[in-house]
Amino acid sequence: MRLLLFSVLFLICGCGDPTPADTRIDKIAQAFCECTGPLVALNQEAARLAADTTAQPGFQENLRKIQAEYTRAKECSATVIGQFGRLKKEEFALVEKALAGKCPDLATQRDLLREMLGE
């Protein structure tokens, strides 16, 4: 009898509200992470290479990669805009907050966010 009571209580307690679906802002943040994450990584690599005076050939190659990745990120962001619309001024802080949890390196890239998804 105790087992039955325990099972019923477990089922009742375990059947709470399901996790709410991602909000529009969360979806935009996730898509922005996917679109621009590689670009930010290349930019960080470029900063590291710029400090290394012996890495000039690698720096030039990295710049070419950045240029190609920027074009890809811009196209990817256009898809995000097509799906969710451009970000309004008041939405930038919300997306930045969502980015902090999803991809912290992008949360500080305010200019890139405005350039890629802003009005």
Image (tube, helix red, strand yellow):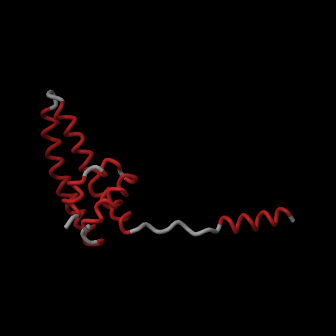
From the viewer's perspective, is residue 18 above or below residue 61?
below
Q: How many marks?
A: 0
Q: Quadrant of the N terminus?
A: bottom right
Q: Position of residue 114 (x, y in %)?
A: 21, 59
Choose top left, top right, bottom left or bottom right for residue 14.
bottom right
Q: Position of residue 13 (x, y in %)?
A: 68, 65
Q: Is residue 90 left or right of residue 3?
A: left
Q: Is residue 1 left or right of residue 24?
A: right
Q: Is residue 11 left or right of residue 53?
A: right
Choose top left, top right, bottom left or bottom right for residue 23.
bottom left
Q: Position of residue 99 (x, y in %)?
A: 35, 55
Q: Residue at x 70, y 69 (%)?
A: 12
Nearer the observer, 39 or 107: 107
Q: Is residue 30 left or right of residue 16?
A: left
Residue at the far front: name it.
90
Q: Position of residue 60 (x, y in %)?
A: 12, 39
Q: Residue at x 24, y 50 (%)?
A: 39
Q: Residue at x 85, y 62 (%)?
A: 2
Nearer the observer, 16 or 74: 16
Residue at the far right: name it.
1
